[in-house]
Image (tube, helix red, strand yellow):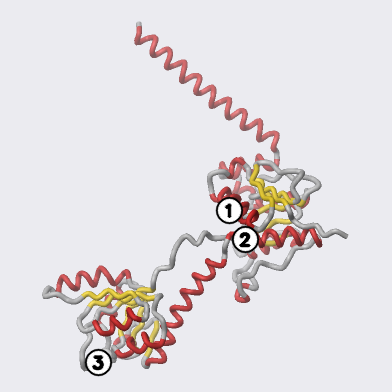
Amino acid sequence: MQTRRCSSVRLVLHEFCRGWIIEKMALKLCEALRDLGVDAVVSERPSPDAAVNHFMIFHYVDVMPGTLNTMAITHVDDMLKVDMARRHLANGVRAAICMSSMTAEQLAGYKVDRDRLTYALPAHDVATAPRRIVIGITSANYSDGRKRDWLLTRLANDMRLDDFEFPIFGRGWEAVAARLEAAGAKVELHVPTVDYKADYEAIKLAIPLFDYYFYPGLDEGSMGALDALAAGVKTIVTNQGFHLDIPHGVTHGFWDYDELLKIFRGIRDDMRGRVEAARALTWTRYAQRHLDIWNALLERDELPPGDRLSAECDSPRIEVNKFPVLSYRELLADPFRREMALRFWTPALFKFYLALRQFRQDLGLGSKFRKMIRASGAESR
């Protein structure tokens, strides 16, 4: 028995979806599928010659018999969209490919056949580069070691700091700055001038741009920490002095070096985790996920397991159907949704409605034109 595989795909893009995100997704998916060796085409109409006809949005579906028909579901926020999914799946669409496990579960909660629901996590262009984590310092450093600058020096010895930036306002940090830069950090040293008022104004402008305010000293507390808190900035400060008496005064507290090292590694890993999650969502991965779905349906008439980035996402983290979708009474109050419902349930009446609207518009333009002709004739007389 010959195994059926997905060799050709028609990505059906309705003309209404041109010029916005759905068109971009269609073009990107098409390009990635071609790179995977699939004969992929974006078209406004399905094809009887394609192995798969995939409708890029479930609002516009025209099933092609003799082929595998699937449809993309973006979101479901009213009962019309629930009924769209139900009706298309009952009339020739084999599977609905949602953008999340939550939407698939949401539709199942509205009695849509779970065996016809799956999802493919969206792709990302990776067009933005991560910025460094900004750790601000606004205190002077002293030769007697009271600010415990050796903590940063040791930190620079024990881990790379390429993910960090240190704007430092204050004297005495030059040697520490050199060690931080050697470990990959970006450092901006702002040495005080003779005008302390102007210096303080510069500090007040800079603090809201910090991700964290840093203070390693054990001498009661940092007045700069108060400025940071006033700006809503998180803190990495010692667990001592008035830091402990201020609600929310300590975001990440430490006393010794091991605690500080753990804090910096945790902040770095947290940021890198977000970056890597986005970087993993490539268009190639998106295309491969669709290809896996189509091949499973063609070969075994069943859907593959869910689209998992990690074990941490094994189940939806919010309660399904916690927020009910709009009822028909609610959606019909909106002109756009009302037209959508009219087109879906009574397409012939919708065409008549469009023709009547166009006629009224043309009639209005005609009357305006006649008024202009009359006005110009009156002026010539």
Q: Amino acid at mark 1?
A: Lys
Amino acid type at image mark 3: Arg
Q: Earlier in the sequence, mark 3 or mark 2?
A: 3
First in sequence: mark 1 vs mark 3 = 1
Whole-angstrom CA distance, mark 1 to mark 3, is: 57 Å
Residue 247 visible to an observer of this rendering: no
At a point 32% along the width and 85% down the height, the residue shown is: 243
Query: Which residue is denoted by mark 3 in the rendering?
Result: 146
Q: Amino acid at mark 2?
A: Tyr
Q: Which residue is mark 2?
A: 286
327 or 59: nearer the viewer = 59
* Residue 159 pos. (x, y %): 41, 84
Q: Is residue 21 above or below residue 107?
A: above
Q: CA distance from mark 2 to mark 1?
A: 9 Å
Q: Secondary structure at mark 1?
A: helix
**Residue, x 44% and y 78% (percent of image)?**
268
